[in-house]
Image (tube, rainbow, N blue to C red):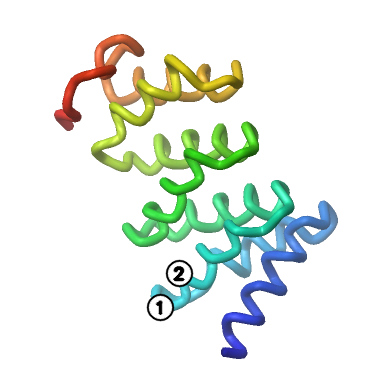
Amino acid sequence: PAGGAAIAAIAALAGDPARRSDAISALAGVPESAIPRVGDALSSRDARVRRAVIEALGRLTHPAASAYVLTALSDSDASVRQLAVTVLSRLGTRGLARSFADLAAGDPSDAVRHAAQIALRRIGKEPGDAAGSPDRQ
């Protein structure tokens, strides 16, 4: 229980620009067993905290961490969705062509659509290629 509270407190500190970098580093240094607690911080009301958590999860390079980042593709904040696309693309997370194509075609944010287009090109697909077809990666 104390570990979860500590992770939540560190995540909350990530909302402070002066502490953001240190908080991300601390969150990215947690053991594999604590990844779910870090992922829980994606429920923060503060988009700055959610973005910091995504960055930390992206540094963990573990399938469980990637799964939490994947949930952020449907976040209400465009900057969070954009960062989630960028992190998942950088990690090379497989099986996301359809999700990226859907975002590239229909996300309300220009920045998210652009990030998804870049992610699709990175995996060797053009934005129109993956829509409506199964992922073949």
Percent coordinates x, y for residue 132 in the rendering: 23, 18
Nearest to the observer: residue 75 or residue 21: 75
What is the distance, in whole Å, between disc 2 and disc 1 at their CAs? 6 Å
Nearest to the observer: residue 47 or residue 114: 47
Left or right of 102, for residue 72: right
Q: Amino acid at mark 2?
A: Ile
At 55% from the left and 36% from the top, the residue drawn is 81
Q: Which residue is mark 1?
A: 33
Q: Secondary structure at mark 1?
A: helix
**Marking on residue 10:** none
At 44% from the left and 55% from the top, the residue drawn is 68
Quadrant housing the C terminus: top left
Percent coordinates x, y for residue 120 in the rendering: 35, 21
Q: Secondary structure at mark 2?
A: helix
At 35% from the left and 31% from the top, the residue drawn is 99
Q: Is residue 62 above or below residue 30?
A: above
Left or right of 23, for residue 68: left
Q: Which residue is mark 2?
A: 35
Evaluate if marks 2 and 1 touch, with contact meaning CB atoms under 8 Å apart: yes
